[in-house]
Image (tube, helix red, strand yellow):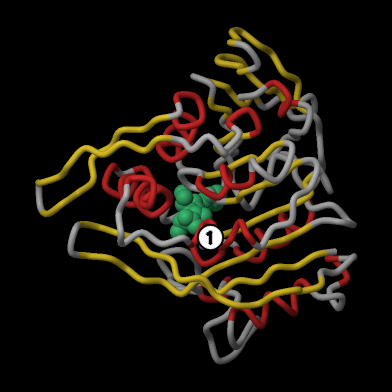
């Protein structure tokens, strides 16, 4: 973990109280802490840093889908989804460039929540001082860090059945690895203090969380109160595999958050919500076509609906 990130972190276990973490370094290479720990001065909880990866997920909340994102096949599928055009695949989409194109350059911190294997985070490295990809999946964070450190990733792309081929992703020179970091953390308990981020993004995440409304509150908490940007994109594939129906932010006839997910999120972020003061102003609402690949003859085409908001 880059040293410069330590001063921006707080204890995610103590939320809603915000307590600083004390950094102990056991081994460091250049600016990268390889082995060490971050300890809360209040609750004394210790968050390890192992092989360069900071583990800041207090892991208390139920998450029914978490282990799915540790599987090799799913990892390979997401690597294709994020970097398909870098391996010259003509089926690849430019979804992540489209999402990144919606963000204005800014100083300070950009957070990519549920950022998986890092494509949007790398895109944001061209637009801010430090872009941090946050994900619960260790396999995803480890892989994204490898691309950050080594500039190259080899992986097996499934062809059919047991057949596959090795492909190589090379990190483009336009991305700034010195302005990128990836940590293991929960998008519903962010280890960042209030108003520390100039931009927050949540791409294809909100329908995968057990507590999506808590995630929105967390995005709001960490985002700056003025001059900050928020990007949220999602296909709203609500499912009881991820969350109880009463937690969904849409996709139901009655109860809290009846109606369509994006309408409810826009209302949630608006001025009317006293807990979200100051409210957000939606500047763009549209969709991006996003693809996931499972093998040579099987792709999922997903309409990910987004809003870009500022305050
Ligand atoms: C559908 S994928 C989307 C990934 C990425 N944002 C994209 O658009 O390609 C959902 C991601 O959220 C991560 N995730 C699931 N629950 C999470 C949580 N509670 N906190 C952080 N990340 C989470 C998963 O590991 C996975 O990488």
Residue at (54%, 57%) from the top-left corner?
97
Q: Ligand 1 near label 1 (Cβ, under 8 Å)? A: yes
Left or right relative to 85: residue 193 = right
For residue 305, above or below residue 112:
below
Name which residue lies at 19% across and 49% down: 158
Identify the image quadrant of residue 286.
Answer: bottom right
- Residue 211: image quadrant is bottom right
Quarter of the image containing the N terminus?
top right
The residue drawn where x is 72% and y is 61% is 230
Q: Position of residue 60 (x, y in %)?
A: 57, 44
174 or 54, nearer to the observer: 174
Q: Give the image location of residue 272, x and y in percent.
A: 86, 78
Residue 62 in view in this figure: no
Q: Note whether 276 is above or below 303 in the view shown.
A: above
Q: Mark 1 points at which residue?
A: 205
* Residue 55 screen position, x and y as percent: 56, 31
Res. 158 in view: yes
Helix, strand or loop at disc 1? loop
Q: Nearer the viewer, residue 291 or 277?
A: 291
Q: Position of residue 164 (x, y in %)?
A: 15, 44
**Residue sticking out furthest to the top:** 26
């Amino acid at each position: 973990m880059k040293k410069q990130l330590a001063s921006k972190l707080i204890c995610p276990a103590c939320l809603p109280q915000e307590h600083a973490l004390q950094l102990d370094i056991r081994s460091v290479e250049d600016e990268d802490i390889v082995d060490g720990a971050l300890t809360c001065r209040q609750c004394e909880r210790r968050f390890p840093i192992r092989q360069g990866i900071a583990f800041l997920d207090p892991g208390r909340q139920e998450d029914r889908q978490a282990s799915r994102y540790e599987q090799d096949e799913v990892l390979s599928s997401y690597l294709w989804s994020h970097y398909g055009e870098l391996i010259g695949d003509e089926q690849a989409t430019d979804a992540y460039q489209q999402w990144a194109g919606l963000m204005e350059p800014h100083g300070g911190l950009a957070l990519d929540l549920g950022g998986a294997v890092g494509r949007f985070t790398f895109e944001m490295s061209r637009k801010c001082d430090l872009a941090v990809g946050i994900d619960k999946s260790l396999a995803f964070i480890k892989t994204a860090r490898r691309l950050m450190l080594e500039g190259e990733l080899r992986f097996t792309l499934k062809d059919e059945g047991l057949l596959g081929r090795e492909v190589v992703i090379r990190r483009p020179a336009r991305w700034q690895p010195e302005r990128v970091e990836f940590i293991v953390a929960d998008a519903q308990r962010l280890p960042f203090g209030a108003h520390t981020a100039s931009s927050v993004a949540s791409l294809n995440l909100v329908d995968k969380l057990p507590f999506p409304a808590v995630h929105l509150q967390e995005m709001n908490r960490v985002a700056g109160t003025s001059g900050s940007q928020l990007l949220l994109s999602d296909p709203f594939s609500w499912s009881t595999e991820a969350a109880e129906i009463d937690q969904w932010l849409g996709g139901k006839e009655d109860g809290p958050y009846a109606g369509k997910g994006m309408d409810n999120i826009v209302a949630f972020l608006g001025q009317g919500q006293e807990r979200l003061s100051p409210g957000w102003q939606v500047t763009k609402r549209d969709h991006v076509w996003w693809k996931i690949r499972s093998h040579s003859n099987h792709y999922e085409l997903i309409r990910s609906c987004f809003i870009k908001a500022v305050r």
